[in-house]
Image: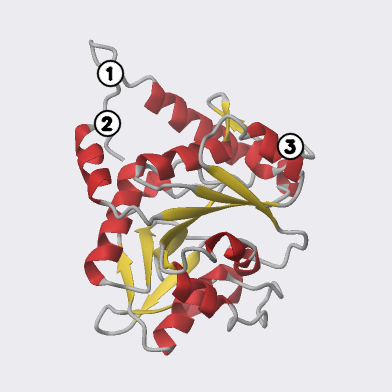
């Protein structure tokens, strides 16, 4: 851990937790196992995500499991401060996060990061920037965004003429005009947990996937008069999740490049993205 990240970590409130979504099957991978169990650079994808959370100052990770839940638990058995909840029906990312609600009943005002477990390229300093923006603005929700040359497949972040957040629209639900937007949602969020779980009770599944989208939560909060912040903190390299074997190969390359970047003293060098 770099000195800079360590100093920032000490400034983060002790009430910060994380929810990591790890229930997906990964049917396009073709291997017949939970997506987060595929390995890159010798480790399951989800373990890289959890490591980044803890390095950013998170106290515990609540991991939402589903497909091959026992195997995911077993693969993460060596990671401390992880608890597990199960999503028995695949009804969308919003529904998955709601499964974690009982874990927060004893601490309803905690801030919480929410991340996908199949996006192992996220780094601690990116999460730290997200957390700092969240605390500095006092927002109910803060969305980290990235700008991509080719945003195909990603949800678009829509802003008004003043640059303020309007909503996130998923690729399959977007109009041609919205598809032209290059600012995307890589699914890195920070919420006030009580605001998050209240808003989740108000989202609907009237969309192309017939699912409850977590991406609808910031719009619901904004409509309720709560502040939603946006921070363009995510380098393009850290956006890629793993949905195909080709993406897994690309992620593997990036992670192995990172782990071999050492100086003459054998210490990790901090890469530029």
Check contact, mark 2 vs mark 3: CB within 8 A. no
| Residue 89 x, y percent position in the rendering | 77, 63
> Is residue 169 depicted above or below 23 in this figure?
below
Q: Are marks 1 and 3 in contact (CB under 8 Å)?
A: no
What x and y, as percent, mark residue 78?
Answer: 58, 29
Q: Position of residue 234 (x, y in %)?
A: 35, 53
Where, quadrant-wise, is the N terminus in this rendering? top left
* Badge 1 density bin: few <14, some 14–19, many ≥20, Cα 10 Å: few
Q: Give x and y (percent) for residue 139.
A: 32, 73
Q: CA distance from mark 1 to mark 2?
A: 10 Å
Q: Residues within 10 Å of mark 3 (few under 14, many from 20)?
A: some
Mark 2 residue crowding within 10 angstroms, few (<14) / some (14–19) / many (20+): few
SS of the residue under disc 1 = loop
Q: Which residue corresponds to the image point at 27% horizontal and 85% vertical from the top-left?
A: 161
Q: Residue most toward the front?
A: 106
The tag on residue 2 is none
From the image, tell me which residue sits under label 1. 267
Q: Secondary structure at mark 3?
A: helix
Kindly identify the residue that appears in the image at 30 percent across and 23 percent down.
Answer: 268
Mark 2 or mark 3, whichever is nearer to me? 3
- The answer to whether one can see residue 168 in this image is no
Q: Which residue is mark 3?
A: 71
Task: Look at mark 2 in the image and give the residue it sits on.
Answer: 270
Mark nearer the viewer, 1 or 3? 3
* Residue 56, above or below 2: below
Q: Label 1 vs label 3: CA separation?
A: 33 Å
Determine the image quadrant of residue 113.
bottom left
Q: Residue at x 42, y 89 (%)?
A: 224
Labels 1, 2: front one: 1
* Residue 218 vertical position relative to residue 245 in the rendered view, above or below: below
Image quarter hosting the C terminus: top left
Query: Where 50 sits versus 144, above or below?
Result: above
């Amino acid at each position: 851990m770099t000195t800079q990240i360590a100093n920032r970590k000490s400034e983060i409130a002790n009430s910060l937790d994380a929810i990591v979504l790890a229930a997906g099957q990964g049917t396009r991978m073709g291997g017949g196992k939970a997506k987060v169990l595929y390995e890159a650079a010798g480790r399951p994808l989800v373990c890289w995500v959890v490591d980044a959370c803890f390095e950013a100052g998170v106290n515990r990770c609540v991991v939402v499991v589903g497909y091959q839940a026992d195997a995911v638990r077993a693969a993460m058995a060596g990671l401390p401060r992880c608890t597990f909840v199960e999503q028995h029906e695949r009804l969308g990312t919003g529904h998955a996060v709601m499964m974690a609600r009982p874990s927060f009943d004893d601490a309803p005002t905690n801030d919480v990061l929410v991340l996908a477990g199949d996006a192992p390229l996220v780094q601690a300093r990116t999460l730290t920037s997200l957390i700092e923006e969240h605390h500095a603005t006092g927002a109910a929700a803060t969305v980290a965004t990235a700008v991509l040359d080719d945003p195909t497949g990603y949800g678009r972040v829509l802003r008004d003429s003043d640059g303020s957040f309007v909503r996130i629209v998923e690729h399959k639900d977007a109009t041609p005009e919205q598809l032209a937007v290059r600012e995307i949602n890589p699914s890195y969020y920070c919420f006030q947990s009580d605001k998050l779980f209240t808003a989740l009770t108000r989202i609907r599944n009237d969309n192309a996937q017939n699912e409850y989208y977590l991406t609808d939560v910031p719009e619901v909060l904004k409509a309720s008069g709560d502040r939603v912040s946006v921070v363009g903190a995510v380098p393009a390299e850290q956006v890629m999740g793993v949905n195909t074997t080709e993406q897994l190969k690309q992620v593997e390359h990036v992670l192995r490049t990172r782990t071999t970047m050492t100086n003459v003293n054998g210490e990790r060098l901090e890469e530029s993205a």
